[in-house]
Image (cartoon, grey):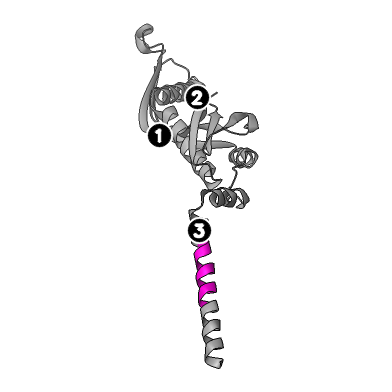
Amino acid sequence: MKKFLAGVLFAVIFCSTGFFIGIPKVINNNPIFKIIEKMITPDPVKVVPDTTVLAAEIQQLAKIETASFVLKNKKFYSTRDNDRFWGILGENLELIASCKVTAGIDLSNITDDNFEILKNQTIKIRLPKAKIFDVIITASSVPSRTKGLLATVDKDMESNTKDYAQNYFLEQALNSDLLDQANQNAQNRIQNLAKKLKFTTVVFTQI
């Protein structure tokens, strides 16, 4: 009798185990259960990028210098009254000057209005154009200055020559790719900020 009861108990446990093992297979293969499972399973947590945070990060950059243009030891010559009275009233000045021109973008006025979130964590950012920040004469010297026998010294001749040199350097910088470099470098920097805030793609336009 004991052997019979033990056999029955074994059979019940075996059948029960098979039944419960088989249930997940039936459920997994049943489309209705799949739909129900999808409905009750919570969506994965998504990180939603915040334009307000990005705007604050960019504003902190303020006026960022992103490119520079340097010219060294350029010679400039100024003369006056050399054609009158055989040059006895004339004056000549040689100036050697070096200059650094810096360019960048002013981001201090960036607001949420400059951003537009597109699909798939893509953001469009409207940036101001790069501009020249400074034209600085970094070094200058006057290796030569002469005047005619009856000439008086023009006290403004050197400063006027420096002003001319400064304008020359500015023109050279504007004719180079300085502003293009400044725009590109600023975009690269802001793109890195945006990607740290989980934006995957950044599209730039200019104001």
First to last magenta residue range? 14-24
Identify which residue, 107 or 41, lies in the foreground: 41
Q: Which mark sits nearer the N-terminus, 2 or 3?
A: 3
Image x and y of residue 194, in percent: 53, 41
Image x and y of residue 14, in percent: 50, 77
Q: Which residue is mark 1?
A: 70
Task: Tell me the chief SS of the magenta region.
Answer: helix
Q: Residues within 10 Å of mark 3 (few under 14, many from 20)?
A: few
Indicate which disc residue 159 carries: 2
Q: Residues within 10 Å of mark 2 (few under 14, many from 20)?
A: few
Q: Which mark sits nearer the N-terminus, 1 or 2?
A: 1
Against 4, residue 88 (above or below) is above
Residue 47 belongs to magenta span: no
Image x and y of residue 181, in percent: 42, 32
Q: Which residue is mark 3?
A: 26
Q: Secondary structure at mark 1?
A: strand
49 left or right of 25 in image: right
